[in-house]
Image (cartoon, rainbow, N blue to C red):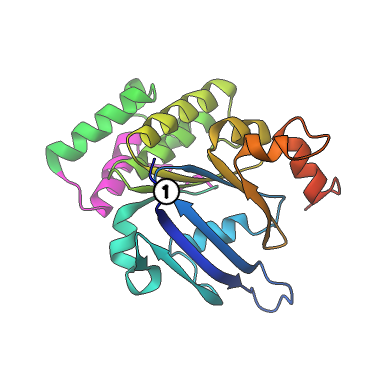
Amino acid sequence: MTHSPVIEISNLTKRYRPADQLAVDGLNLNIRQGEIFGLLGPNGAGKTTTISILCTHLQPTSGKIKINGKEIFSNQLAIRKEIGFVPQDIALYEQLTAKENLLFFGNMFGMHGKELKSKIDYWLNAFGLEEKAGKRIKTFSGGMKRRVNLIAALLHEPKILFLDEPTVGIDVQSKNVIIDYLKEVNKKGTTIIYTSHHMDEAEHFCSRIAIIDYGKIITKGEPKTLIEDCNGCDKLEDIFLKLTGRKLRD
């Protein structure tokens, strides 16, 4: 793995009017080429807002962001070709089949013909969905929808993959399949930025993490090192609770 930053974030802020509190508050972060980076935090901490800004879906209030050396909001079209995004909410057309959905999303990225069909067949087979290709999405389980949603983001072979809670609400089998294939994609050079509430999953999946709360990064580093440096902490969840507290978040 190289250590050059593929994402550079400087003094990023976002305020949703009329709220007084910033959703993202002066965030500074570099993410390295080829790593799996976890952005972790309680509900409302600013994770999804940050991911949405990085994917050019949301304008920041202030700050600078570069992806592969390019300022993102003056190079949106070029940036979007280099990234894949898996949102927290399923972004599929319920009335279309799995294959029809993937053809649609592939076309959006300029893919057509045999190349697109070959990639769709490959990923449907990889995720155990080849026999469901002609079935409508509305008949799929939550885990199956998550897998199709991920395939839609992988078809154009993005250099950077953003994942917002990619394993939320699914069975263990689907979660393991998704994590295993994400590791394979990462080994081939794709940088992954991932948000999750699953601390055990993040501890074993991520090469580095940052914990964000009230829009600010409160710690970052390699999970193993953070655990070793935290008195009384045996796992990443211990650090998370120690820094963010046990109070319930809406």
Left/right of residue 75 with respect to residue 32 in the rendered view = left
The amino acid pointed to by label 1 is: His
Return the x and y of residue 228 as percentages of the image width and height: 71, 35
- Residue at (25, 28) in percent of width and height: 121
Q: Residue at x 53, y 39 (%)?
A: 166
Of 178 and 209, which appears nearest the observer? 209
Task: Read off the magenta span.
Answer: 89-112
Query: What is the x, y in percent for residue 23?
Result: 66, 67
Q: With 81 as the anchor, is 234 left or right in this view?
A: right
Magenta region includes residue 92: yes
For the residue pair 142 and 67, the one nearer the viewer reads as 67
| Residue 200 image position (x, y, % from top left) | 66, 31
Q: Is residue 172 left or right of residue 214?
A: left
Q: Is residue 142 magenta?
A: no
Residue, x 45% and y 42% (percent of image)? Answer: 35
Tell me the SS state at disc 1.
Answer: loop
Q: Which residue is mark 1?
A: 3
- How crowded pointer 1 is (Cα within 10 Å; few <14, some 14-19, many 20+) is rated as few
Reply above or below: 111 against 21.
above
Q: Residue furthest right?
A: 247
Work out which quarter of the rendered image holds the N terminus and state it. Answer: top left
How many marks the image carries: the answer is: 1
